[in-house]
Image: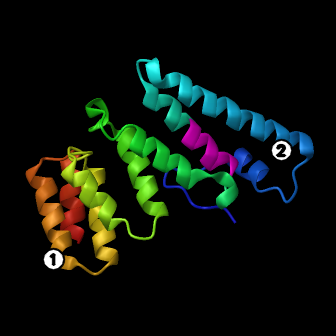
């Protein structure tokens, strides 16, 4: 089984990653690619957009290990990326960085604490996706008053796209 991704998957890559068995050469090539990706994120620190290497690594991991699981090492990778840039103000409103945090939140048991932290540190608050994702977590916990407050705050912040956030609030 493949873990669903909100952005979907490429059919050919999915078929290859879900093969029942992989040859030693395929496994070695995958491990070599992982090492290349690790080296790229380490080397990206001095670059103009170090987050780009991390996003590419995360995307590759999601595609290569479609079934997820511990062998993908996705959760530690998401944690490392999220914490690596937690003090980088240039990424506070970057949609790529917000998606890293939301993907991380989807993978943990209690995502509410993550959204509390993101809110306290002003990460993603200009984006409707932040408010919608936080509201979904709270709605899953049946905290309906808090959901309404989250949507209201997102609307007050004029998070974009505003029309989408208004629709989500109305549907709630």
Q: Residue drawn at (45%, 54%), measured in percent from left and top?
A: 103
How far across and down, in percent of the image, does residue 164 sit? 25, 53
Is residue 42 or residue 142 the one in the foreground? 42
Q: Is residue 150 left or right of residue 11?
A: left
Identify the residue under disc 2. 27
Q: Quadrant of residue 140?
A: bottom left
Helix, strand or loop for disc 1 = helix
- Total of numbered circles in the picture? 2
Return the residue found at the far left.
Answer: 156
Which secondary structure is most common in the magenta stretch?
A: helix
State which mark lies toward you, 2 or 1. 2
Task: For mark 2, give the secondary structure.
Answer: helix
- Which stretch did the figure color magenta? 57-65
What percent of the width, then of the height, locates residue 77?
Answer: 54, 47
Residue 83 in picture, x, y percent from top left = 40, 44
The circle on residue 121 is none
Q: Is residue 172 visible?
A: yes
Of all residues, the one furthest to the top in this rendering is 47
Q: Which residue is mark 1?
A: 145
Q: Is residue 90 above or below residue 146?
A: above
């Amino acid at each position: 089984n493949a873990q669903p991704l909100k952005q979907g998957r490429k059919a050919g890559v999915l078929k290859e990653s879900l093969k029942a068995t992989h040859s030693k050469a395929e496994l070695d090539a995958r491990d070599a690619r992982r090492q290349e990706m690790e080296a790229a994120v380490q080397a990206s620190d001095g670059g103009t957009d170090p987050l780009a290497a991390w996003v590419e690594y995360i995307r590759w991991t999601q595609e290569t290990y479609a079934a997820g699981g511990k062998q993908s090492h996705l959760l530690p990778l998401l944690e490392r990326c999220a914490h690596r840039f937690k003090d980088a103000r240039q990424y506070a409103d970057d949609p790529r960085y917000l998606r890293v945090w939301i993907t991380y939140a989807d993978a943990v048991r209690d995502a509410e604490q993550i959204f509390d932290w993101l809110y306290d540190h002003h990460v993603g608050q200009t984006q409707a996706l932040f408010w919608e994702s936080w509201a979904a977590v709270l709605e899953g916990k049946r905290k309906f008053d808090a959901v309404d407050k989250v949507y209201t705050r997102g609307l007050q912040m004029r998070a974009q796209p505003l029309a989408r956030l208004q629709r989500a609030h109305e549907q709630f």
